[in-house]
Amino acid sequence: MSMPPMPRRTGYAVLAALAAVVILVSTAIFIGLGGDTGGTDPRAQGARGSADPASAGSWVGTWSTSAAAAEPRTLRGLSGMSIRNVVHTTIGGTSARIQLSNFYSSRPLTITHASLAVAAAPSNPTAATGTMRRLTFNNRSWVTIPPGKAVTSDPARLAVPDSADLLVTTYTPQASGSVTYHPHARQTSYLARGDRTEDTAGAAYTQQSPYWRYLTGVDVWSKQAEGAVAVLGDSITDGITSTAGANHRWTDFLSERLRSEPGAPRFGVLNQGISGNRVLSDGTQYPPNNPSGLSRFNRDVLSRTGVKAVIVELGVNDILRIPHETDPHRIVWGLKRLTEQAHARGLRVVGATLTPFYGHRGYTPQLDAVRERVNAQIRAGRVFDEVVDFDKALRDPISPLRLRPMYDSGDHLHPSDNGYRAMARALDLDHLRGRTAAEL
């Protein structure tokens, strides 16, 4: 039986409804397949739900350093210079972004040009073929960083290898105030006159530098990484006596273990050591240079990208530096506060015993007794969730108050390269996997 003809107005309504359904279905398919910006922006990929977050990927810190102070004699900055920082990755990824800091300046810092590349060879200012990328900030090629602040760049698509040198270059044309820097890089970086930011050849970079300037972090987009371990420490973590350019800090040897040992967690390693750093006391000036572990814990550890574990190696400078802290309970109190801050973020803390310093110019039996009493509290499990016994790993079995000669750099306080390797070996990697806070 034939149906009566549909009224024209009703027909239009049905057609409109069908069109709306088609649009909704098409939009759902488009979004599901990664349409719009979500399909090309790793940040958008990470924001969408997934049954398998590891396969979707995430941002993870591969390298970082702590802003330590204002560089001396840079009240007008380094205007008209290209600064090419050389840094070493711990894990790789398919995209990268950087963090720049203007923490120690009283004036805004304007970066008009920035770039990222893989180095053609270790410690070399020449970029590997095809790896030079211009960096942007909110889709602009320039950024102004207010005093005391930091910024993160937009992601740049770049195949970043594990254990490779990256070149991060910035250029500012105008006076900008004191340069925020990390003085003991143990790595050669470079400077060139004029805007040489995207030079792939290193010929213009004729001035060498032992510092990292402005740059405080590099993150990668990774589908394999489980997260990062952030290490808060002093000159022993900073690696001040390690071979320059060799990546022989103890955190470098830890990264090597995490990459090579079967079953090891796939973590980036973030070195937040500052030479001379203490748990309790800041340095001089304002903002304080060499800020205490307590005051910088949020900035340098808890705010780092993808942190899943924390290691604390601090306390010796509280004892050795003037004014000497001779009350072990105050040092232990400070270390416990660090653990509490980490627990508030759901992170467990692996803490290190304080290493020997007999023979160092600052040694006295009274000061060493303070160290021993702090270590007794740490070993008793009253300070951290887990313990790595660096004292036991480094001390001379014949004369336990001193470093073992093969692990001594010669100043009787800082380890040699062999000593740094022994420190990395002493860590139980399973302690980095903890998910619940211990009852202390």
Image (tube, helix red, strand yellow):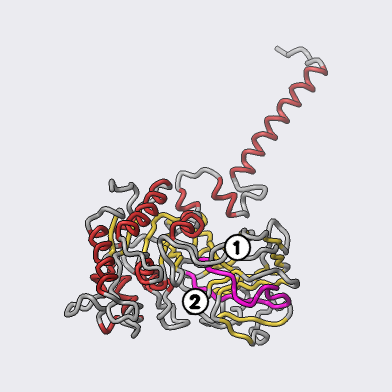
Place of residue 104 in the rendered image (x, y in percent of width and height, measured from the top left): 60, 65
Estimate the x, y position of residue 268 in percent, counting from the top left: 44, 63
In the image, 107 versus 209, the foreground residue is: 107
- Identify which amino acid the numbered label 1 is placed on: Phe
Q: Residue 378 sits in which quadrant?
A: bottom left
Q: Residue 75 in magenta? A: yes
Q: Is residue 110 visible?
A: yes
- Pick whichever of labels 2 and 1 is earlier in the sequence: 1
Residue that carries the numbered disc 2 in the rendered image? 184
Q: Secondary structure at mark 2?
A: loop
- Which residue is identified by label 1? 103
The segment highlighted magenta reads: 64-89
Say which amino acid is labelled 2.
Answer: His
The residue drawn where x is 64% and y is 65% is 105
Label 2 – label 1 distance at C-alpha: 17 Å
Query: Which residue appears at 16% of the width and 80% of the height?
Result: 398
Q: Which quadrant holds residue 190?
A: bottom right
